[in-house]
Image (tube, rainbow, N blue to C red):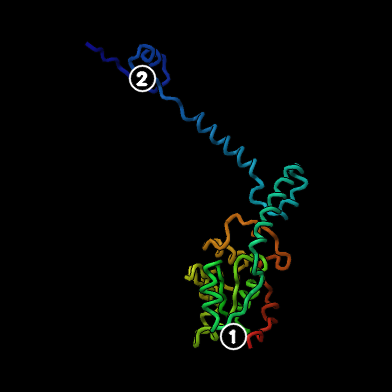
Amino acid sequence: MPVNVPVDDPNADTEWNDILRSKGIIPEKPPSPTPIIEEALLEAQEKAHENRLEDKGLDELDELEDEEDEAFLQKYRQQRIAELSNLQKSSIHNQVYPLQKPDYARDVTEASSKYFVCVLLTSPLGTNVESQLLIEYWRELAKKYGNIKFCEMRADLCIEGYPERNTPTVLIYRNGDIVKQIVTLRQMKGVDTKIQDVERLLIDVKAIQENDVRIKEKDHSSQDGKISQRQTDDADDDDWD
């Protein structure tokens, strides 16, 4: 008949357990997961180091000239230039289009079957700081992301009686539908909204990709991503008259 051998902990590293394992009385101890985890962590660290420049733009790569191997930097420079070249081929707009109500369906709804269309409904009042802020951002973003069609129209000319308190309003179209609507910048950061916040909005609706190389490129015309109060106050609001 089988003999019951007392075992406190079959997984413990004891001489008694080693004897029992050699006799086949208790099973072999399962391999420790520690080496596997350590190997995976090391592999992840090595991969992260190899790909440390993966999300760097051309400007950021230039700033690393004294820290990184030149051949390594040049590889990523060429990669960024190739990516920008491919994007340039699809950049067919690069301007803000003024909208007319009779052409709205053609220029916005129907056009959105080919590319994202972002419509900015502005305030008729030059005192609306949020509206002036987005007008400036619209111009910068249109130049930067030419594969997206940026349009602009005074809200009251688009929708009769549209409340001034609801401006600016942003409508983002794709495939004939509104995929995102923002009513005033209170839904973002108010007058503290920066151009990077609008870019994040475009990423969220997949109008641009998270790793789009253009996001990293510095905009030398607006270093902090926000126009000054003086620019807002001096903005010409007669373009739509």
CA–CA distance in space, label 1 to label 2: 81 Å
Q: Nearer the viewer, residue 5 or 238?
A: 238
Look at 54% across and 32% down and name the residue there. Answer: 38
Q: Amino acid at mark 1?
A: Pro
Give how far across and how far down residue 33 sits, in percent.
Answer: 47, 30
Look at 39% across and 12% down and name the residue there. Answer: 22
Q: Nearer the viewer, residue 46 or 33?
A: 46
Residue identified by numbered label 1:
124
Name the image quarter holding the N terminus: top left
> Disc 1 or 2, which lies upstream in sequence?
2
Left or right: where 147 falls relative to 7:
right
Write down the quadrant of residue 21 in the picture: top left
Question: Is residue 56 visible from the viewing direction of this image?
Answer: yes
How would you rate the neighbour count of disc 2 (Cα within 10 Å): few for under 14, some for 14-19, many for 20 or more?
Answer: few
Question: The residue tagged with tag 2: helix, strand or loop?
Answer: loop
Give how far across and how far down residue 30 sits, in percent.
Answer: 41, 24
Write down the quadrant of residue 27 in the picture: top left
Left or right: where 236 falls relative to 189:
right
Q: Amino acid at mark 2?
A: Pro
Question: The residue tagged with tag 1: helix, strand or loop?
Answer: loop
Look at 66% across and 67% down and name the residue there. Answer: 225
Give how far across and how far down residue 29 sits, in percent.
Answer: 40, 22
Write down the quadrant of residue 152 in the picture: bottom right
Name the image quarter holding the C terminus: bottom right
Question: Is residue 186 visible from the viewing direction of this image?
Answer: no
The label nearer to you, 1 versus 2, is 1
Give how far across and how far down residue 231 sits, in percent.
Answer: 70, 77
